[in-house]
């Protein structure tokens, strides 16, 4: 499997997912052609894996909250384009990206499972993720849900309000999941619309609470400067 082929498979899958989920959000019926195109592209990505791992990747990528856009932009394409990745051979880079995707899929599904268990126990950690676009998005107020403030490798996992998280969340938030991780694993995407939500908003760690409107404006100005410098 060449790097180019991995890129192509994932990029076309992401494009097809955006098209499919966009229809769902607008209440449009799926056409047989677009449905089978999406399934073909999902199969093309999952074929990189064998057995249980293949099923796991398939399940995660089929979830309407998998952060497909950010995953592609940061953990795959962005990671490969970084200066530090330049000395890595394309073959090794592909292997790393494919491995990272399956690890991310596993983590994503574990967090989804934990969130649903917590909800059943009457301890919801954040927004309801019932899988229906009719649920709508949380009110963003001044926040446009770009998720840029969640592009972090990790942080101190001091969850608030006396909340005792599942043990693995400590590792996830600390950034131990993978050295190739470029954003927080608790960040989910709403139906591939590039709107991102914190799945543990109500109990998120202290460092996330202190990020306020002023810091957001600062971060956005910084990003705008960076983009302008890149032309
Ligand atoms: S960077 Fe600002 S606008 Fe974007 S998600 Fe964070 S708080 Fe919201
Ligand atoms: S815990 Fe939530 S707010 Fe904090 S970085 Fe992760 S997704 Fe963002």
Image (cartoon, grey):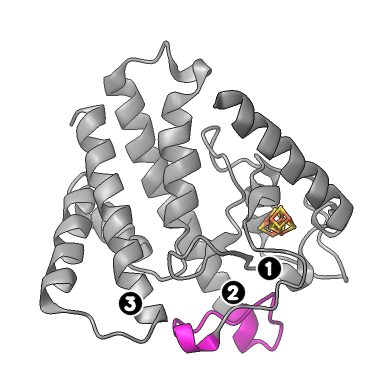
Q: Is mark 1 within 8 Å of ligand 2?
A: yes
- The image quarter containing residue 94 is top left
What numbered label is drawn on residue 20?
Answer: none
Where residue 46 sits in the image (x, y, percent)? Answer: 23, 52
Which residue is located at x 49 percent, y 60 percent? 108
The answer to whether marks 2 and 1 mark residues whose Cβ atoms lie closer than 8 Å is yes
**Residue 212 in view here:** no
Where residue 180 sits in the image (x, y, percent)? Answer: 51, 34
Q: Is mark 3 within 8 Å of ligand 1?
A: no
Residue 131 lies in magenta, yes or no?
yes
Q: Earlier in the sequence, mark 2 or mark 3?
A: 3
What numbered label is drawn on residue 200?
Answer: 1
What numbered label is drawn on residue 115?
Answer: 2
Where is 161 relative to 186, above or below?
below
Q: Which residue is mark 3?
A: 23
Q: CA distance from mark 2 to mark 1?
A: 8 Å
Where is 104 relative to 189, above or below?
above
Q: Nearer the viewer, mark 2 or mark 1?
A: 1
Q: What's the magenta region?
A: 117-135
Left or right position of 22 against 206: left
Name the dominant secondary structure of the magenta segment. Answer: loop
Ligand 2 falls in which quarter? bottom right
- The image quarter containing residue 17 is bottom left
Left or right position of 18 against 159: left
Q: Nearer the viewer, residue 35 or 52?
A: 35
Residue 228 lies in magenta, yes or no?
no
Q: Residue furthest top?
A: 87
Alpha-carbon neighbours of circle 1 within 10 Å: few (<14), some, or many (≥20)?
Answer: some
């Amino acid at each position: 499997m060449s790097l180019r082929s991995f890129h192509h498979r994932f990029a076309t899958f992401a494009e097809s997912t955006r098209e499919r989920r966009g229809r769902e959000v607008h209440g449009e019926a799926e056409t047989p052609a677009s449905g089978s195109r999406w399934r073909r592209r999902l199969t093309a990505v999952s074929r990189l894996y064998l057995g249980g791992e293949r099923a796991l990747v398939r399940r995660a990528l089929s979830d309407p909250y998998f952060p497909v856009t950010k995953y592609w932009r940061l953990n795959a394409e962005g990671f490969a384009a970084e200066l530090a990745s330049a000395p890595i051979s394309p073959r090794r880079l592909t292997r790393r990206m494919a491995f990272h995707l399956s690890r991310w899929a596993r983590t994503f599904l574990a967090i989804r499972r934990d969130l649903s268990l917590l909800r059943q126990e009457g301890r919801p950690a954040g927004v309801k993720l019932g899988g229906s676009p009719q649920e709508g998005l949380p009110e963003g107020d001044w926040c446009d849900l770009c998720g840029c403030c969640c592009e972090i490798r990790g942080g101190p996992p001091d969850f608030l309000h006396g909340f005792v998280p599942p043990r693995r969340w400590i590792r996830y938030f600390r950034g131990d999941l993978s050295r190739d991780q470029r954003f927080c694993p608790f960040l989910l995407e709403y139906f591939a619309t590039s709107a991102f939500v914190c799945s543990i908003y109500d109990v998120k760690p202290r460092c996330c609470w202190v990020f306020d409107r002023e810091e957001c404006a600062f971060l956005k100005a910084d990003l705008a400067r960076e983009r302008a410098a890149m032309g």
